[in-house]
Image (cartoon, helix red, strand yellow):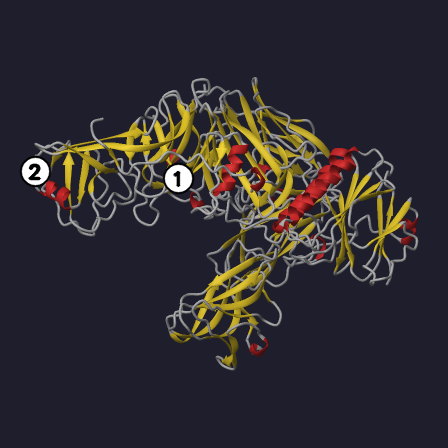
Amino acid sequence: MPSLRPLLPALLAAALAAPAHAAGSEAREHPAYSATRDRPGQLASAPTRGLFVTPELRGQPPFPAPAGLSGPSGFPGPFASVPGFAPAGGSEGRAYAGPVGASTGLPAAAAPAGPAFPAFPTAPAHPAAADPVDGIETARVGRQVAPGVRLESYDRLEGDRWLRIDELVADLGAGSGVRAEYLGGVGPATVAEAAARHAAGPGRRVVAAVNGDFFDIRATGAPLGPGVRAGRLLHSASPGPGGGAAVGFGADGTGRVLRLVAAGAVTLPGGPARPLAGYNAARPPAEGFSAYTADWSGRTLPAPAPGPGAMVELRDATVVAPARTPLRSARPRRPAPGTTLLFASGARQTAALVALRTGDRVTVTARPLPTSGPVPVAAVGGREPLVVDGRPLDHTGRPNDTAAPRTAAALSEDGRRLRLVTVDGRQRDSGGLTLTGLGRLLHRLGAHQALNLDGGGSSTLLASASGASTPSTENSPSDGSPRPVPNGLVLTAPTGSGQLAGYRVEAQGAATRLFPGLTRTLTATGHDTSFGPAAGTPRWTAGSGRIGPDAVFRAGKPGPVTVEARRGGARGTLRLDVLGPPARIRPAPARIGLLTRDESATLTLTGYDAQGAAAPVEPRDVTLHYDRRRWSVTEDGHGGYTVTALVPRATGRLRATIRASDSDPAGGSATGVTAEVALGVGSVTRPLSALDDAAAWTGTGAAPAEGRPGRGLALEPGPGRPAVATPPRPLPVPELARSVSLWVHGDASGARPALELLDADGAVVTLRGPTVDWAGWRELNLPLPGTAERPLTLTRLSATGTRSGRLVLDTLTAPTPPTGPAVPGTVRPDPVVASADEVRARSWRFAVAPAPAPGTAVPAGTADLVLTGAEPRPFVHRGVRFLPLDTTRRTLDGGGLARMRALTGALDAAAREPWTGALAVVAPYAPHTVDRKEAALLTRRLAEFRRDTGKNAVLIIPGAPRFSAARGEGVPTVATTRTTRTLFGVDAFPAPGHEWLSVRQERP
């Protein structure tokens, strides 16, 4: 899945893409409801349907909200978030559904160094009843990376977290020619950088890689476990956790989890062989000999141990200079090839090195020694065993058993099937796994042995796409970018023939939908029978519309169309879906605020047809109008625009209009479809609170105080006693604010202030100030994280300290670019909104009304039944299956999993019931309870149900602040108010092409 740059428009979270039309790349889907993985900043490259994520589309909804509602991101009008259902997304981006994907056209004399290592534990195994991975899979895509190597990527919803998992499955050994090898060895580098320079050998190529061992992140940067390449020891394990645990691979390619020690010796002139305590070890033992060679993989050599110590330099086993002693803090550089630096710690060892003279012969040997079995050809260290002899281990209560990003290696019983797995974590879209949960997951995947590798920000997985010359990052590293690591595991495979056998055909941004008369840029990447690169310019053809040698397809009439790239017998196809004419266009973002001329922002445009089906609109199909004296707007080459300012301070507007096309079968109906974007550059200080109302703030250790000037708020923390203050009402933070500023009067007590905010999903965002080591007033400016879901509200101030202190806070502000409000789009009434006569003309009616007072009933009037949103269980009435959803529990407090299981049951039942023509989901308004990913998943499954069964669906949200109705991907969403009654007219089995539902808000 190639990384997605900030360019793609938002597509609604209800994919209606068609199945793939070529072999060589595939998606495994739910039997009834297909989905693409929700992956921040990336697109699935397998042909499938469903969610994709655009990182910068903050505030975009997963489905078009009813008109007039302002959602969490503050966008008014028909595209705002549906009440109670926030846009999908996470710390890295938003989830949107659209037809995404691509298709291909192919088918020992010395004692072992270091401590004695115990055997792997065999108990306790994790009891099945405590399985922490008991949720549901929500999306999956897969593709063949090379013969014998496959990538599976999938999302899961657990009771308390979302998960994103990438899994490389490799068949090792002579049959496939796939080998696992040691990656790295020349200092910390990203996995991609290390893979790019890995010497795969003649006739072989790199196809995939993951990060490897834990490492000395705060000092040397060197791996803490053992490492073996081509049967040669690169580095020994350091004392500490892990104990030499490693995953190793033999000469026949098969793998196993094992323990490795270093069998090493130092032979000085005229003396016996002495044990070598460490070989290129990140943390050598406190006493003994340690050797460092050009295989050293850290940034810098370790600091000398306290106490007596010495170092000699050996070149070709000969001392080149007298020993250095005592060792200073300055560390030697990495040894050159052919050079060994021999260190001694401890009085006896130091004396032995000091006695050496220039020209003396000193022999240093080191080799890998497994505690059992043959010496591996390649091995990378790890730490905790996760599965031993087919049993997952329970790490509960042990160190490192917290939810975090994870990387692991797992093997089948015969060692021929290797799984390299990453689990994203520390992100809204994926909360990570504990060691116990990771072991359970791997056991369920079939692991007989499994070892935990370095996780956290190190977790990185790469895989090649068909025809690609280098692998690309598939997971989402928790640091926001790949972390340099010292080593990893790389998969290599035989190089193919290089003869063209097929094409991987992709749409720009993996967007396979477009509008009549508009265009989509395509690419065709040639590959051979081994999915390796192969050159050859194709000839393009299309079933309808037109496409030229420039690979730009211009759509004709609505409907599916297959585009083919062919050269001789090599071919590749991609199905595109031409929607109805665009009815509206939406910019993302709706406002662009730049602090300086040095900044830039990405702008993308998404169009919607009358049914709410969405597709990106490329720049060649758009005319832009803006003040060219103040702004620069250029195409970014990826389907969007880059916006920069030409002056230091300005506001303005940008208007985008879809161009008419001669080939538009609607006769130029696209003409005049416009949208506007508010622009601004500079900084304006927006007030949040002057704290004149400090007396109304409540909390422990908080009180009014003399401010700067006027009133301020005093916080008096103490040891184990934080001071907190809650405002009378939450303070809204401007949506484009970059930071929050406040004045702090310090007493040099070491106390630390903090601000707590809630984001649009109700998640807590904490801004921590510095330790107060000053006296008097000082202004603090605390940056807002770019990953927080806007808008934000400030909900609490606090202070902590290790001793008693007193801070006075005053004048909360938010520096914000001056853009002005977003420009509302044109609102067209949805067809479901009807007159009273139209509602009465339907076969039957139901009403949604406010809950009655206790002991009273809601009058039915002309309705067969009345819903209040408090119905306890599903039911069927006159061809409509009703599914009430309990929205009182938060998504990640078990509520999301319960609702999705209920939805799946209702969808399955409605699909198989011949007497059911529609499904109505009733989900009461519940802001901050249903998160954006759950909202997107619900909407997507309703749209897929409608597409796959031909039956209808509606989402009803009782108790919203105001009435509104709109649709996404053909599924109406109707928000009814908490004070008035709404009447629905129903024809559960309408005539083809006719609406099945009419809605009318009755007068109070």
Q: Is residue 64 left or right of residue 342?
A: right
Looking at the rendered structure, the secondary structure element under dot 2 is loop
Q: Is residue 667 left or right of residue 207?
A: right
Badge 2 density bin: few <14, some 14–19, many ≥20, Cα 10 Å: some
Check the picture and name the quadrant holding the C terminus: bottom right
Q: Position of residue 300 (x, y in %)?
A: 27, 45
Residue situated in front as seen by the camera: 923 or 631: 923
Residue occupying the far front of the picture: 124
Up/down of 329 relative to 991, above or below: below
* Residue in view at x 19 percent, y 41 percent: 288
**Residue 485 appears in the picture as rendered:** yes
Residue situated in front as seen by the camera: 886 or 566: 886
Looking at the rendered structure, the secondary structure element under dot 1 is loop
Badge 1 density bin: few <14, some 14–19, many ≥20, Cα 10 Å: many
Q: CA distance from mark 2 to mark 1?
A: 41 Å
Splitting the image into 4 quarters, where does residue 244 fall?
top left
Q: Is residue 719 left or right of residue 712?
A: left
Up/down of 893 relative to 42, above or below: below
Cβ atoms under marks 2 and 1 closer than 8 Å: no
What residue sits right under mark 2 in the picture?
A: 358
| Amino acid type, callout 2 | Thr
| Amino acid type, callout 1 | Arg
Residue 383: image tag: 1
Disc nearer the start of the sequence (2/1):
2
Residue situated in front as seen by the camera: 769 or 613: 769
Q: Position of residue 221 (x, y in %)?
A: 32, 45
Q: Position of residue 211 (x, y in %)?
A: 41, 38
Splitting the image into 4 quarters, where does residue 574 fall?
top right
**Residue 12 appears in the picture as rendered:** no
Splitting the image into 4 quarters, where does residue 231 fall?
top left
Q: Position of residue 3 (x, y in %)?
A: 51, 40
